[in-house]
């Protein structure tokens, strides 16, 4: 044992009882603040007790450990000094504190071990010893009982809380089962009512079905009788009707053939039918003559002659015409004026008219009300109106009169190769103005 430990031990054996009790109380309070790793093993079970109970129960173990374990005594002194900062600092620095309780001063001096701490302890030994009063002992016992009652109350409260939680969970489960049972009962009641209604109306449905079957049988018997009479009459007149039908069919076929021949001659259509021997001889065939007579494209008389052809289809390059006729008007006004004028032309001539506008000029949805008989198309994205016009010409059967209105020379040449006749925008504008 070191000299300091020997001195501490000898001093501890001479500590007055009040000083020793105060030392144990301060050390017990500090014990609850120390980490478990810094508490000696014999004292660890007391660390979780209440302060009063801890000081009472650990006194027999705490005193000897403070006398022998210098490291634990220093840790305890450090914690006690933090709890009693002003008085602890004064005692550690050797400053006299006349107004302080000598017992408190001696206990702190014993734990902190400043210079001349033995003298402070010895001074406390000269004080008269006061016997503890019975009231203090009763208060201690009551404090212990109060701590024990609080602990028991806390434990009971925790058990009751657990039971309440279990009861709540059980209540939720029971409520859920009750709702499920109610839903099943409601479903069974509904199903029972439905089946009862079906059973009550089953006889009525069977009777109604029997009545309907009887009525249908009577109707079928009457129909059979009627058909037998018709069959008898048909057999009697079958020969006459076959002869009359053959005559009508032959007359209709002759009429259709003569009409087709006349139409082929009028439209200069190539002859059809089976392959002839002369068709097998190679050679260059002449190009088909354009629709209508040869005349300037802006000839008003030629325009009227073309419109008079049977089943003529008039295809118009919309903006090519409107920008020539009304170049200063907004595009929406140009479109409406053109289709309105074409509506009047359709009403006069009963022709098929298609107007194609370039879709690239559009910035949004188009509000346009074309009159009856005027078809309006906008070219789709990435396709110009000229290509849509060529597609319309290709879609028509060979031999049908097609007139394309466009001043664009490339359009006129391409549709001419496809068998259509092209006129300039001026011819249509003149015709509209004249109307």
Image (cartoon, helix red, strand yellow):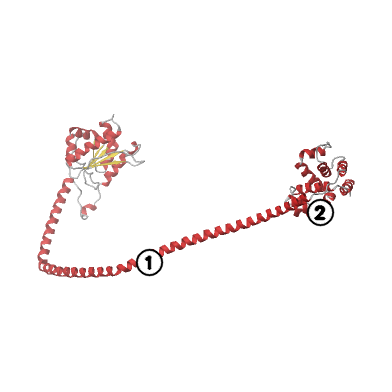
Q: Position of residue 38 (x, y in %)?
A: 77, 49
Q: Which mark is residue 60?
A: 2
Inspect this view and state whether residue 278 appears: yes
Residue furthest top in the image: 328
Which structural element holds mark 1?
helix
Residue 417 is situated, as x and y percent measured from the top left of the image, at 27, 42
Q: Secondary structure at mark 2?
A: helix
Residue reaching furthest to the front: 134
Question: Which residue occupies the foreground of this view, 234 or 178?
Answer: 178
Q: Quadrant of residue 216?
A: bottom left
Quote the CA–CA distance across marks 1 and 2: 82 Å
Percent position of residue 77, x then y: 80, 44
Quarter of the picture holding the C terminus: top left
Q: Earlier in the sequence, mark 1 or mark 2?
A: 2
Residue 121 vs residue 55: left or right?
right
36 sits left or right of 215 in the view: right
Residue in the image at 81% along x and 41% along y? 101
Of 38 and 243, the residue lying toward us? 38
- Give neighbour class at mark 1: few <14, some 14-19, many 20+ (Cα, 10 Å): few
Q: Is residue 49 visible?
A: no
């Amino acid at each position: 044992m070191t000299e300091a430990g020997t001195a501490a031990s000898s001093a501890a054996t001479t500590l007055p009882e009040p000083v020793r009790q105060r030392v144990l109380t301060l050390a017990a309070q500090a014990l609850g603040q120390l980490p478990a790793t810094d508490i000696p093993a014999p004292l660890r079970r007391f660390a979780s007790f209440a302060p009063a109970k801890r000081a009472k129960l650990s006194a027999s173990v705490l005193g000897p450990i403070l006398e022998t374990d210098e490291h634990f005594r220093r840790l305890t002194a450090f914690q006690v000094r933090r709890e009693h900062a002003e008085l602890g600092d004064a005692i550690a620095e050797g400053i006299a504190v006349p107004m302080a309780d000598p017992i408190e001063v001696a206990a702190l001096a014993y734990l902190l071990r400043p210079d001349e701490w033995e003298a402070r302890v010895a001074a406390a030994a000269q004080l008269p010893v006061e016997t503890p009063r019975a009231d203090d002992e009763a208060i201690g016992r009551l404090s212990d009982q109060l701590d024990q009652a609080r602990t028991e109350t806390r434990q009971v409260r925790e058990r009751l809380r657990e039971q309440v939680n279990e009861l709540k969970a059980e209540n939720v489960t029971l409520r859920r089962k009750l709702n499920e049972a109610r839903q099943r009962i409601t479903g069974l009641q509904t199903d029972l009512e439905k089946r009862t209604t079906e059973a009550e109306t089953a006889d009525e449905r069977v009777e109604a079905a029997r009545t309907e079957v009887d009525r249908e049988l009577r109707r079928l018997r009457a129909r059979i009788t009627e058909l037998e009479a018709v069959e008898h009459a048909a057999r009697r007149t079958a020969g006459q009707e076959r002869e009359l039908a053959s005559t009508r069919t032959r007359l209709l076929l002759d009429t259709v053939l003569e009409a087709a021949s006349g139409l082929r001659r009028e439209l200069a259509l190539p002859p059809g039918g089976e392959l002839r021997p002369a068709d097998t001889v190679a050679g260059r065939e002449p190009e088909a003559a354009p629709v209508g007579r040869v005349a300037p494209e802006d000839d008003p008389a030629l325009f009227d002659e073309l419109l008079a052809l049977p089943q003529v289809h008039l295809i118009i390059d919309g903006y090519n015409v409107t920008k020539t006729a009304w170049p200063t008007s907004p595009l929406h006004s140009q479109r409406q004026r053109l289709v309105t004028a074409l509506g009047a032309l359709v009403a006069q001539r009963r022709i098929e008219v298609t107007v194609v506008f370039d879709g690239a000029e559009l910035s949004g949805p188009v509000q346009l009300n074309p009159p009856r008989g005027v078809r309006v198309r906008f070219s789709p994205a990435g396709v110009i109106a000229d290509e849509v016009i060529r597609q319309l010409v290709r879609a028509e059967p060979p031999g049908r009169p097609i007139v394309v209105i466009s001043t664009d020379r490339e359009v006129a040449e391409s549709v001419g190769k496809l068998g259509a006749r092209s006129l300039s925008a001026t011819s249509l504008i003149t015709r509209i103005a004249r109307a």
